[in-house]
Amino acid sequence: MKNRLSHRLQNISYSQTIAMSAKARELKNKGYDIINLSLGEPDFLPPNFVLNAAKKAIDEGYHYYTPVSGYLELRKVICKKFLRDNHLTYTPSQIVVSTGAKQAIMNVLLSLLNKNDEVIIPAPYWVSYLQMVKLCESCPVVIQTTMKNNFKIHPEQLEKAITCKTKLFIFSTPCNPTGSVYSYEELKNLAEIFKKYPKIMILSDEIYEHICYSDKHTTSIAIFSDIHDQVITLNGLSKAFSMTGWRIGYIGAPEWISQSCDKIQGQMTSCANSIAQIAAISALKADPSKIGYMIKEFRKRKNLVFDLIKEINGFQLNQPDGAFYIFPKVSSFFGKKLHGKIIQNADDLSEFLLEKAQVATVSGSAFGDKECLRISYASSNEKIIEAFNRIKKVLK
Ligand code: PMP
Ligand code: GLU
């Protein structure tokens, strides 16, 4: 049966983050005491004012299809948000609201990519980029980074990877899974390279924008005027507002891209959920300080995780400045026998931790780095402490 599936599908794999989380859920339902640190999903409730806006939207009758790219009022609010938080100027016709950032990414890829086009992706990368590119029958070109460089690419690496087939560059800052954040200067240096290749587009995934621990605000690469028209700026409500299930993502892009995303979306899903769009208006209108309590809590948890991990030998860490993951290098365990099992790679270690410590993590292989493990700290302090105690015990 499998070979009756399209070549497109035969070529891609399941999302490993979602698969691990499903496995953890299944074991939990069977009665195992699993602590799930695999999924990148905040454990807060969305802010009350957003919940109230959604309830009001139901009562006020927002039950019907919206314009394909989203309500005009929402797109206007998104333009104001881009100006307020990112110093970016977009008009409502350059905005497309989609069913999560995932759909927004797929819209962009389907708009731009032909078979065998190349897409440059720095590794470690977010799990779905590579598979989505393959789904378009295009070729991911992965740039490997190192922990020494805090998992960020050098402009020379970028230029080396560019060929006449390069169509797109995709990256996230703050980065899932490494937490690395590109500084203004680092982005400026990358922009200098892109300026030389005006046909290459850049998909800047800024979904973790507000979850940033450095004093400086994150920078959007689209602020560099020479390359502004090459950039698609992506964001969404899943992380900052803890609204993963509401499925709202959006882009600001040159009009030829926003129009083509609108065309695709009009055929695929018609529009994003109407109630969630009304809630998004209130979320994005609000000053970012309204979600400061979540960021404060993530910062505390990051510090807690750093303290706890120091007590475990063999985990090597970079300095994450954003998002809510740590991505330790765990290769010192490779080749070692733990509780009768030889650990060959990060997949084995992740399996081992699930089996013996009942803690779910995700192997770095999902993100293009086989030596690391991703651990999400979007979980309560109690769960984090218990999880690290268990990990320490089984790795002793
Ligand atoms: N980009 C990154 C870097 C992510 O971590 C996620 C998390 N799922 C997404 C995009 C997709 O987000 P959404 O829930 O809005 O589809
Ligand atoms: N972005 C989250 C993660 O990386 C959610 C899972 C997913 O969408 O793949 O865990």
Image (cartoon, helix red, strand yellow):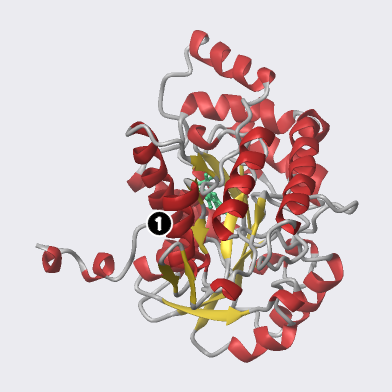
- Label 1 packing within 10 angstroms: few (<14), some (14-19), many (20+): few
Percent position of residue 352, x then y: 45, 58
Q: Is residue 98 visible?
A: no
Whether 93 is drawn above or below 255: the answer is: above
Q: Which residue appears at 65% of the width and 78% of the height? A: 145
Percent position of residue 168, x then y: 55, 73
Residue that lies at the very extreme toward the right in this rendered image: 215
Residue that lies at the very extreme toward the left in this rendered image: 1
Residue labelled with disc 1: 15
Asked whether 200 or 91 is in front, the reply is: 200
Say what secondary structure mark 1 lies in.
loop
Asked whether 217 or 392 is in front, the reply is: 392
Report whether the residue tagged 1 is closer than 8 Å to ligand 2: yes
Based on the displayed image, in which of its 4 quarters is residue 156 positioned? bottom right
Q: Is residue 182 visible?
A: yes
Percent position of residue 273, x then y: 46, 31
Percent position of residue 4, x then y: 11, 65
Asked whether 151 or 30 is in front, the reply is: 30
Based on the displayed image, in which of its 4 quarters is residue 392 positioned? bottom right
The answer to whether residue 286 is left or right of residue 376 is right
Quadrant, the N terminus: bottom left
Amino acid type at circle 1 is Ser
Quadrant, the C terminus: bottom right
